[in-house]
Image: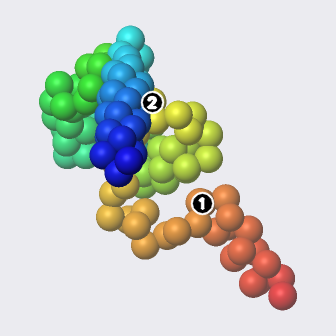
């Protein structure tokens, strides 16, 4: 009796393991997609060079090997590109961007920081 229960249990576990391994064999997320690397400074600077170097080599390390495009968005010391990534960019993983040292000390987007300064002055 015990051996029959053990056999049924092992059969069930093996069937479950087969179905899980079969379900994970799906097409990579980035296959046929475009990955945009946002560089938050003007072309030609050190941040642009780092972003382009990153973009050149990242595709071969991602399943599906997406096409990689570099987009520069300079202005306000890098805050325009950073705010774009944080507020406007699609949230599906097709756009990435570096955060440079200046923005790391400012957790709020520029628009919210300006509004909070105005409230403090008025208050």
Looking at the picture, how far across and down is residue 52, in whole percent?
A: 22, 32
Quadrant of the rendered image containing residue 28? top left
Q: Earlier in the sequence, mark 2 or mark 1?
A: 2
Q: Vertical placement of 57 versus 84: above or below? A: above
Checking the image for residue 74, the label placed there is none
Which residue lies under the disc numbered 2?
Answer: 94
Q: Residue at x 55, y 49 (%)?
A: 86
Q: Residue furthest top?
A: 32
Q: Residue furthest bottom?
A: 123
Q: Is residue 58 left or right of residue 12?
A: left
The answer to whether residue 69 of the structure is visible from this angle is no
Give the crowd class for mark 1: few <14, some 14-19, many >=20 residues within 10 Å.
some
Q: Nearer the viewer, residue 118 or 36?
A: 36
Q: Please, what secondary structure does the residue beneath circle 2 have? A: loop
Q: Residue at x 25, y 30 (%)?
A: 62
Q: Nearer the viewer, residue 96 or 46?
A: 96
Q: Residue at x 25, y 46 (%)?
A: 47
Q: Please, what secondary structure does the residue beneath circle 1 have? A: helix
Which residue lies under the disc numbered 1?
Answer: 110
Q: How far apart are the two marked residues, 2 and 1, measured between alpha carbons?
A: 23 Å
The answer to whether residue 19 of the structure is visible from this angle is yes
Q: Is residue 31 left or right of residue 115?
A: left
Looking at the picture, how far across and down is residue 40, in whole percent?
A: 40, 44
Q: Nearer the viewer, residue 62 or 13?
A: 13
What is the number of callouts on the image?
2
Q: Is residue 92 left or right of residue 8?
A: right
Quadrant for the C terminus, please.
Answer: bottom right
Q: Residue furthest right?
A: 123
Looking at the picture, how far across and down is residue 82, in whole percent?
A: 48, 50
């Amino acid at each position: 009796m015990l051996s029959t229960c053990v056999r049924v249990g092992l059969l069930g576990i093996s069937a479950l393991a087969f179905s899980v391994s079969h379900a994970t064999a799906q097409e990579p997320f980035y296959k046929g997609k475009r990955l945009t690397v946002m560089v938050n400074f003007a072309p030609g600077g050190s941040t642009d060079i780092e972003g382009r170097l990153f973009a050149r080599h990242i595709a071969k390390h991602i399943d599906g090997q997406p096409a990689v495009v570099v987009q520069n968005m300079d202005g306000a010391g890098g805050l325009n590109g950073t705010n774009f990534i944080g507020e406007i960019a699609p949230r599906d993983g097709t756009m990435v961007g570096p955060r440079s040292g200046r923005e790391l000390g400012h957790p709020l987007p520029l628009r919210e920081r300006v509004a909070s300064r105005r409230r403090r002055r008025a208050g």
